[in-house]
Amino acid sequence: SQISEQQSTMANIMSSSTTGRSVLLFLFAAAIAFNILSIQLFERSIVSPERIRQPASPLRESLLPPYKKNTTAAAAAAAVPVRLHEQQDGPPRQQDPQQQQQSRIPIPSDVCRPNVIVYLAQKGNHTSYGRDSFGLLTRSLDLLYTNYLNEYYDSASLIIFHTGDFTDDDVAALEQRQAPHTRGTVQLVDLTQVAGGIYWSLPPFLQQDDPSTWFLPDYTVGYRHMMRWYALKLYDYLRDDTHNNSCQYKYVMRMDEESFIYSPIRYNVFDFMQTNGYSYGFRLCSFEMRHMKPLWKEYMTQKKEIAPTIERPNFVQHDLCGFYNNWFILELDWIFEPPVQDWLQWMDGTGYIYRKRVNDLIIHTAAVYAFLPAPKIHRFLDFTYQHFTNYKKSGCPLWGALAGGYADPNALETVLRYHREEIVQRNCPRPYEKKPYYPRLMTNLSIADQSPTYHHLIADKGILTLPVVAAGHVDLAGVGLRSG
């Protein structure tokens, strides 16, 4: 009724004179200004997440990358880690994108970098799984640069190992997709040519074997070369490599062509490992250690004088977490410690990698459990990561996981979208009582089932669950300390 009276009064004023129109405009402008001021005062009265977030324990805080003190509400809620040297109050100063590009000078690939990121890739369809390897590699690299290397391009070299199917033109095409300041990072290494092919060939005592008699003969000799490469030969190469890098690498990070980092990593992961004294870092668990118990028993029978530095009588149980090592960070000094090398060389000498298809996951996990104490092992849970092996025909996930990270505010959305588009719309089989390991959605997988001994989370962050979609024996629910 008040509005109707005001409108009637204003109409009378308008009809009376030109002065009335001026008064109307003045009143209208004053009303708008009053509404804007009211909204601003209301917004200021709201308590932001930064104001109610309690400070973390200094002791536990030291275990994680540092955090920005003042940031946006969304980022504060996610507690996004930043670079180790960014300890400033207030928002970071913004820089014009063109000035930022000009201020960053590409570093030639022959300049010494302290760490290395490695891929082992194929250019055509994968020989064992039939997937588009080059397309997956391109996507993996795009995500790696977007979410990490664009900022930390000077922290590590990037080597793409291959077996003769890549050229310099391929590297140029891959780097052309990235920001100019990052170019020159990628190196190509043909394993069939370097050092006479010693890193990609059968051990001498197996060269007379008939591969058709090996366990699971559908897995090619090349696939078994890959397992041996990541079990031990990669580290021999990095130790021996002097022609592309004038210094010793400290850490190596493995990426697969189907390894996808979906959220920003806002800190130098290699500095983080070194600062906290970690020798092995991983992202996912794969429960396939059932083959380890007889192998370790055989090893210890033959090597009675060798014993694990840390006694863990249950570490060879078949239901323990195996480190799903399609993504890991490893300290090279540790891998060359005598007890570790003794285990690796013994395993290589048995021929089981080829004859019994004992994979690099089992070999690595045994070495970590046996020869590293818990404080030197770290499970990364902050970034969203995916690695799946799919069925050839249907494209449905066979083994792997897409795991949301606690520092990714879009983690749940990413997991739900993948489940909808890649599982539901493909009409993939659902898990049931007799087949519980078919693709499954877990929007609230407890962190108590995600290696609580190794993830070193800050206690008062209040993180209890994370979203995961998984297939096979990867990231199981209800396992507790068996996950690490």
Image: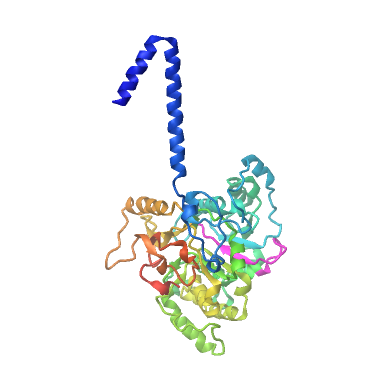
Q: Is residue 24 magenta?
A: no
Residue 205 versus residue 91: which sits nearer the camera?
A: 91
Residue 162 position by quadrant? bottom right
Residue 203 versus residue 104: which sits nearer the camera?
A: 104
Residue 164 versus residue 433: which sits nearer the camera?
A: 433
Provide residue 378's location: percent of width, then percent of height. Answer: 52, 69
Residue 17 shows in the view: yes
Residue 419 is left or right of residue 108, and the answer is left
Residue 402 position by quadrant? bottom left
Provide residue 365's location: percent of width, then percent of height. Answer: 50, 74
Q: Is residue 63 above or below residue 372?
A: above
Provide residue 1's location: percent of width, then percent of height. Answer: 28, 25
Residue 442 is left or right of residue 47, and the answer is left
Residue drawn at x 62%, y 48% is 172
Span colored in magenta: 239-257
Residue 346 versus residue 310: which sits nearer the camera?
A: 310
